[in-house]
Image: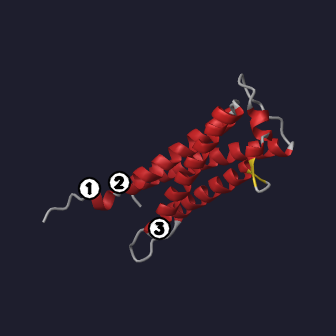
Amino acid sequence: MSSQNRRWLGWALGLSIAGLGVSIYLWLGKLGNAPLICGPSGGCISVNASPYSEIFGIPVAALGALMYLCLAAIALYLLFSPKRSGKESPPGVAFAGFAIALSGALFSLYLTGIEAFVLRAYCIWCLVSWGIITTTAVLWARALLNKPGEARSTRRT
């Protein structure tokens, strides 16, 4: 694996772990097991207690934790999977990381719209998570578009 691939996968893993931490914190706050520190906006409690903070009775923060856990697992797999017959990992694995991150970023954008236009309250932790997952989606997209071995071949015929 090239050093460029290791670098972006390291960033993807780090961002996923950070997002996992934020999601677990919000999940614990939703369950009443952790006090939510909201900062100056003070909207974390009202946002986390709103009907939009659950889907079919499952806290959105729990779904976020699952998403970040999946992204971390994919990054770890790509970082440490053994090469088979000199080939890189299947391209579908990296695409799965991108698809999960993009879905999470779009859903997080939707929830931010709910905060702004319906609840009229902002949760700073939710906004941090939105930033993390959006950055992660962009990172996965750039990695898929910039395959070092194919796009920038320096071999001349």
Query: Callout 3: helix, strand or loop?
Result: helix
- First reached walking from the N terminus: tag 2 or tag 1: 2
The color scheme shown is secondary structure
Q: Which mark is residue 92?
A: 3
Q: Position of residue 67 (x, y in %)?
A: 64, 55
Other residues around mark 2 within 10 Å, as few (<14) / some (14–19) / many (≥20): few
Q: Amino acid at mark 3?
A: Gly
Q: Which mark is residue 146?
A: 2
Q: Amino acid at mark 2?
A: Asn
Number of numbered discs: 3
- First reached walking from the N terminus: tag 3 or tag 2: 3
Q: Position of residue 63 (x, y in %)?
A: 70, 54
- On screen, residue 87 versus residue 107, left or right, reads left
Q: Which mark is residue 152?
A: 1
Q: Amino acid at mark 1?
A: Arg
Q: Position of residue 106 (x, y in %)?
A: 55, 48
Other residues around mark 3 within 10 Å, as few (<14) / some (14–19) / many (≥20): few
CA gap between label 3 and label 2 equals 15 Å
